[in-house]
Image (cartoon, rainbow, N blue to C red):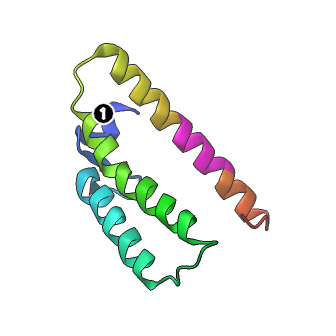
């Protein structure tokens, strides 16, 4: 990510000049997923899917914090690659969505 977008290891500036606290946002995402989970009816078919959603959604914050705090040069390179892949995949999804492809 270019240096002009990074305020600190935890804050990202988006193109609209808003600063996002990534620890706060990933924690909020986990909380929102848990709240969403509570609204779903559980049955034998969707219960394992709901459990997986909660596990994966709430682990994002922990994984972010662990990677953000790492000192290893190799870890930083891998973190950068993961960020770039996320941006690429997001761009692909947005372009498909803009061409009326429902995901």
Left or right of residue 95, residue 25 in this image: left
Pick whichever, 20 or 46, lies toward us.
46
Magenta stretch: includes residue 34: no
Q: Residues within 10 Å of mark 1 (few under 14, many from 20)?
A: some
Pick whichever, 82 or 59, lies toward us.
59
User: In the image, residue 86 lies at what x, y percent?
Assistant: 53, 42
The residue drawn where x is 40% and y is 29% is 79
Please determine whether, in this image, residue 14 is positioned above or below residue 75. Answer: below
Residue marked by disc 1: 67
Please determine whether, in this image, residue 101 is positioned above or below residue 64. Answer: below
Q: Residue furthest top?
A: 73
Magenta stretch: includes residue 89: yes
User: In the image, residue 64 lies at what x, y percent?
Assistant: 32, 42
Please determine whether, in this image, residue 22 is positioned above or below residue 41. Answer: above
The residue drawn where x is 48% and y is 28% is 81
Write down the region rendered in magenta. Answer: 85-92
Is any atom of residue 21 visible in this view?
A: yes
Predominant SS along the magenta part? helix
- Using the rendered view, name the quadrant where residue 21 is placed: bottom left
Q: In which quadrant of the rendered image does the C terminus lie? A: bottom right
User: In the image, residue 50 lies at what x, y percent?
Assistant: 51, 68
- Using the rendered view, name the quadrant where residue 19 is placed: bottom left
User: In the image, residue 15 lies at what x, y percent?
Assistant: 41, 53
The residue drawn where x is 28% and y is 51% is 22
Left or right of residue 18, residue 46 in this image: right
Pick whichever, 37 or 12, lies toward us.
37
Left or right of residue 57, residue 101 in this image: right
At mark 1, the secondary structure is helix
Please determine whether, in this image, residue 70 is positioned above or below residue 22. Answer: above
């Amino acid at each position: 990510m270019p240096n002009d977008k990074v305020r600190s290891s935890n804050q990202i500036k988006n193109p609209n000049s808003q600063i996002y606290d990534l620890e706060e946002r990933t924690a909020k995402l986990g909380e929102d997923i848990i709240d969403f989970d509570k609204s779903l009816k559980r049955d034998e078919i969707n219960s394992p899917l709901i459990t997986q959603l909660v596990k994966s959604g709430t682990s994002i914050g922990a994984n972010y914090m662990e990677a953000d705090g790492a000192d290893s040069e190799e870890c930083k390179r891998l973190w950068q690659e993961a960020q770039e892949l996320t941006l690429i995949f997001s761009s692909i999804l947005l372009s498909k969505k803009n061409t009326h492809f429902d995901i």
